[in-house]
Image: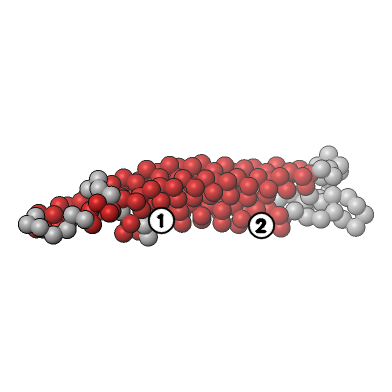
Amino acid sequence: MASAGYETCPAWAPAFGYMGAASCIILANFGSAWGTWRAGLGVCKMGIDYPKGIIKNIVPIVMAGVLGIYGLIVAVILTQAIREPAVDGTTRYSTFNGYAHLAAGLCCGISCLAAGGTIGVIGDAGVQAFGLRASGGKRSWASEGDGGGDDTGLGGNSEAMNTDGANKLYVGLLIMLIFSEALALYGLIVALILSQHSYVCE
C-alpha cells in the first residue's frame, strides 16, 4: 500500500481491469466455440464413414471446451482484484493494477483463442482421417453389406490392418492436440502471475 494522488489512481483506472476480465472471457469463449465448431463438424463427417469411432474421437471437442474454463478462472480472479472506491470517493485501484490486469486478460484470452483455432483445425482433419483409415475408405453401410462369402478371412485381416493403422494415426492426433492445448495453458500460467502484481492507493 502507498499514498498516491490522482495521477497514480485516477477514476478511470478500474476500466482497464474490467476490460482485461471481459477480453479474457470473451476471447477464451470464442476460441472454445471455434474449436468445438470445427472439431464437431469433423466428428459428424467421420461418423458417416466410421460410426464406431464417434465416442473415441470426441476428445478434441472436450479439449476445446476446457479453454472456456481457463478464461473463466482468470476473469473471476481479475474481477475480484478490482477494489471499490474509498469512503471519500477516491479511487484505490491504481493504473499499475489496471495495466497488469489488462495484460493478464489479453494474455490468457488470446492464447485460448489461438489454441481453440489450432484444436479445431487439427481435430477436424484428424478425426476425418481416422475415420477414413479405419473404414478403409468405405462408407459404413457399404462395408456392412460386404460380409459373408469366401473372402471373410481376407476381409477380416484387412479390417484389422485398417484398425491398427487408424490407432497409430490416433496417437499422433492426441499428441498434436495436447501441444495445442498447452498453448492456452501457457497463457493461463502467465496471466495468473500477472494478476498477482498489485499497487494499492490508500
Q: In this rendering, would 129 be left or right of 62? A: left
Q: Which mark is residue 41?
A: none
Residue 124: x and y in percent read 40, 45
Q: Residues within 10 Å of mark 2 (few under 14, many from 20)?
A: some
Kind of residue at disc 2:
Val
Kind of residue at disc 1:
Val
Q: Kindly state the secondary structure of the residue where label 1 is placed.
A: helix
The residue under the point 28% across, 53% down is 140
Tell me, yes or no, whether the two marked residues, 2 and 1, touch with CB atoms within 8 Å.
no
Upstream in sequence: badge 2 or badge 1: 1
Q: Residues within 10 Å of mark 1 (few under 14, many from 20)?
A: some
Q: Which residue in the structure is indicated by mark 1? A: 59
The residue positioned farthest toward the top in the image shown: 7
Q: Nearer the viewer, residue 85 or 196?
A: 85
Residue 193: x and y in percent read 59, 50
Q: Which residue in the structure is indicated by mark 2? A: 76
Q: Nearer the viewer, residue 50 or 13?
A: 50
Question: From this viewpoint, is residue 179 visible?
Answer: no
